[in-house]
């Protein structure tokens, strides 16, 4: 069975600090996808990134970066120079690569950026 | 495109009442999904559909029913509401080919008292 663990329930930092959100996953599939979603206080889910299990290159998008390490089954998310608008709950998720590609979510990390 | 729409946004039910949560998408997506998000938790899959007339159970299907008579609509039915069904319900859709991230609706917040 697939499983995603986000060990950090809540993180609070001061604005402009860097922060890393951890994600560890379990799967027996050799091919799979990993995702990060953001849920701001308004409640909607915002897609941030998708990573194919064959692609272990790190990715950077502005202040956001993702570190995928297959050897440790981790897909960590770093926000550089955090801003108050980054305050949200962040979910890591895993899906099979074939068929319905049902998402399995972690329990989420609530990130609070204090001014 | 409106994307994925859900109605209602909020609803309060009494124990034993029934209701249908509506979900529609205008992107011609084949796959549609229903998830629930309990307080402080991640989303869990209730049911999903790979196309009109085809549905299947997810991780937490008990107490729910679905139907998919058209590509656009994927309603979720609660027959006998229970307090354990108090949750936020999200509908999502995904195309058959190409981009494989799921597009989520805004959610329906349901309280059963």
Image (cartoon, coloured by chain):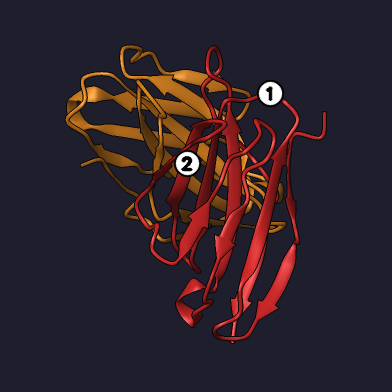
Chain colours: A orange, B red
C-alpha span from label 2 to label 1: 16 Å
Front-most of residues B113 and A57: B113
Residue B26 appears left or right of A31: right
Chain identity of mark 1: B
Q: Nearer the viewer, residue A9 or B99?
A: B99
The answer to whether residue A97 of the structure is visible from this angle is: yes
Residue visible at 56% across and 46% down?
Answer: B67
* Residue pointed to by mark 1: B28
**Above or below: residue A115 compared with residue A48:** below
x, y percent for residue A67: 38, 26
Q: Secondary structure at mark 1?
A: loop
**Quadrant of the image occupied by residue B108:** bottom right
Q: Which residue is mark 2?
A: B48
Residue A83 percent coordinates (x, y): 67, 45
- Which one is in front, B23 or A26? B23
**Quarter occupied by the N terminus of chain B:** top right
Disc 2 is placed on an element classified as strand
Which residue corresponds to the image point at 21% horizontal and 20% vertical from the top-left? A30
Residue A66 against residue A93 in the figure, above or below: above
Chain bearing mark 2: B
Q: N-terminal of the two: label 2 or label 1? A: 1
């Amino acid at each position: 069975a697939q499983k995603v663990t986000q060990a950090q329930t809540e993180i609070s930092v001061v604005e402009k600090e860097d922060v890393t959100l951890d994600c560890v996953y379990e799967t027996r599939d050799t091919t799979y996808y990993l995702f990060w979603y953001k849920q701001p206080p308004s409640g909607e889910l915002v897609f941030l990134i998708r990573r194919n299990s064959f692609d272990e290159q790190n990715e950077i998008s502005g202040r956001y970066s993702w570190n995928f390490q297959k050897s440790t089954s981790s897909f960590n998310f770093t926000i550089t120079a955090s801003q108050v608008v980054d305050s949200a709950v962040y979910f890591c998720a895993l899906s099979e690569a074939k068929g319905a590609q049902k998402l399995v979510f972690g329990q989420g990390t609530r990130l609070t950026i204090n001014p | 495109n409106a994307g994925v729409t859900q109605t209602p946004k909020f609803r309060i039910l009494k124990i034993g009442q029934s209701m249908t949560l509506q979900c529609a998408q205008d992107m011609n997506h084949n796959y549609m999904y229903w998830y629930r998000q309990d307080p402080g938790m991640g989303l869990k899959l209730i049911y999903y559909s790979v196309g009109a007339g085809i549905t299947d159970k997810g991780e937490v299907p008990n107490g729910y029913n679905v139907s998919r008579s058209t590509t656009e609509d994927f309603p979720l039915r609660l027959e006998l509401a229970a307090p354990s069904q108090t949750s936020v319900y999200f509908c999502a859709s995904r195309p058959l080919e190409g981009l494989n991230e799921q597009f989520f609706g805004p959610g329906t917040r349901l309280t059963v008292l």
